[in-house]
Image: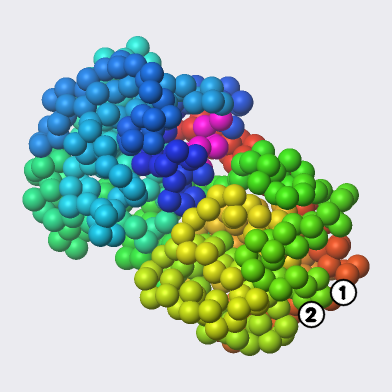
Amino acid sequence: MKILFATSELAPWVKTGGLGDVAGALPAALRKLGMDVRVLVPAYPEMLEGFPDAEEIARPLELGGLLPTPTLRQALSPDGTPLLLLDYPPYFNRPGNPYLGPEGRDWLDNHLRFGLLSRVAAWLGSEASTLDWQPDIVHCHDWQTGLAPAYLHYLPGRRARSLLTVHNLAFQGLFDHASLFELGLPDAAWGIDGVEYYGYLSFLKAGLKHANAITTVSPGYAREIQTDEEGMGMAGLLRHRTEQLSGILNGIDDKAWNPATDRHLHQTYSARRLEDKAINKAELQRQLGLEQRRDIPLLGVVSRLTEQKGLDLLLEVTSQALDLPAQLVVLGSGTHALEQDYAALARKHPGQCAVAVGFDEALAHRIEAGADIFVMPSRFEPCGLNQMYSLRYGTPPVVRATGGLADTVIDAADEKLGNGFVFGTATADALLQALQRATTAWRDAKGWRALQKRGMARKSGWAEAARQYVELYQRL
């Protein structure tokens, strides 16, 4: 089967979160199972720098509305996956984040930028395409390509089937009514059975309504988003389409995230050489200016600093957590207020708390390896990847029972299967109690080693997820 991945991010070149990781790893896993997968992604500066010899293969014409004529270029990723780079410099030749301008606000023309991405995905899946290769399935990801199933629905002639994967329901791509004309959608699309959503045009709602199938990135999240509490206003539509909705748990890149071969670490290690993990803790403490102590646990956080991730809850109890005693290292960026609060926390507790605002791939790996306990108190988490990295690195995670976290972390109270620490309610007190349980367990060296090994034994690659996607493609 021929599968077109349509995505606004592609790791390692352009990534703001889990979407980039999935788009970077899943196509290669699908190709190993015999799927003919190609990835459509905007030609951001990072993509053109990574593939300077990408050759022009098409110019999609007459896309409708105010959509321009872009250039489609072809390249080959290092793992052999063909890439289709959507090149239109006025839209995509911009520095920094794919979605935000220098002042941290959405680009005002995001509807046109990602409308063009969606429309070209639909063009490739329609009879209008001038390429010899035409997909059987257009696999879209999040709101940025959510219009593709709607475009396919309204196009004449033979069309590919469509699948929409929701990585985070909170981001819905909302724009005003005038966008309907600018995007070249028919008047008939404006309504409850089309792209209209409470007076706005929603890219995500368009995809949820028109895609032939919908997936989310974990079974738990698929269940949660059909409830009014977690459905972000889309629960009714999702319940209506429950027969077309399923959850497929993400994998991780188990080559890039492997403590036995990780080039970012000061010392590689494995489940058989767990004593070498302590070298990474000592080096991380030295690098970040923490006291060189082996007798207290080091808590690690790598995350967006937002309320969704529960980092405000951790902030409330950090002083009590440090008094357990413990150390804390935080890497991430997010809301300005939380960034400032965490920076102030590090100044207040020198030697015991270290905070790096921003993102550093190498440091992220070193935190996963050097920390004793990973903290991930998300209010909601579609899948989560860091808890899986942590399990693989022998760093038992403390997580809230939500979405993919609940699907991957089993509480240590289960002495046969437990691999981490799980708490229920999204409160600071519940988080603190879980941290207390984790730090107490850390002091039992034999029990802790068994907990680490159970986590490290968990299968976490993409093979199983890829197999489930292939089955879904075949049904479509």
Question: Dot 2: within a 10 Å radius of its alpha carbon, few (fewer than 14), some, or many (20 or more) residues?
Answer: few
Residue 183 seen in the current view: yes
- Image location of residue 208, percent across then percent down: 34, 49
Q: Residue at x 10, y 36 (%)?
A: 65
Which residue in the rendered view is the most extreme toward the right? 446
Q: Left or right of 67: which side holds 296?
A: right
Question: Dot 1: within a 10 Å radius of its alpha carbon, few (fewer than 14), some, or many (20 or more) residues?
Answer: few
Kind of residue sitting beneath label 2? Thr
Q: Residue at x 65, y 77 (%)?
A: 352
Q: Which residues are magenta?
A: 22-28
Residue that numbered label 2 is attached to? 440
* Secondary structure state at the residue bearing disc 2: helix
Q: Left or right of 249: which side holds 136?
A: left
* Secondary structure state at the residue bearing disc 1: loop
Q: Residue at x 27, y 42 (%)?
A: 94
- Image location of residue 300, percent across then percent down: 64, 66
In the rendered image, the vertical position of residue 101 relative to residue 53, given as above or below: below
Most frequent secondary structure within the magenta stretch: helix
Kind of residue sitting beneath label 1? Asp
Residue that numbered label 1 is attached to? 444
- Residue nearest the observer in this picture, 125 or 297: 297
- Image location of residue 178, percent across then percent down: 8, 50
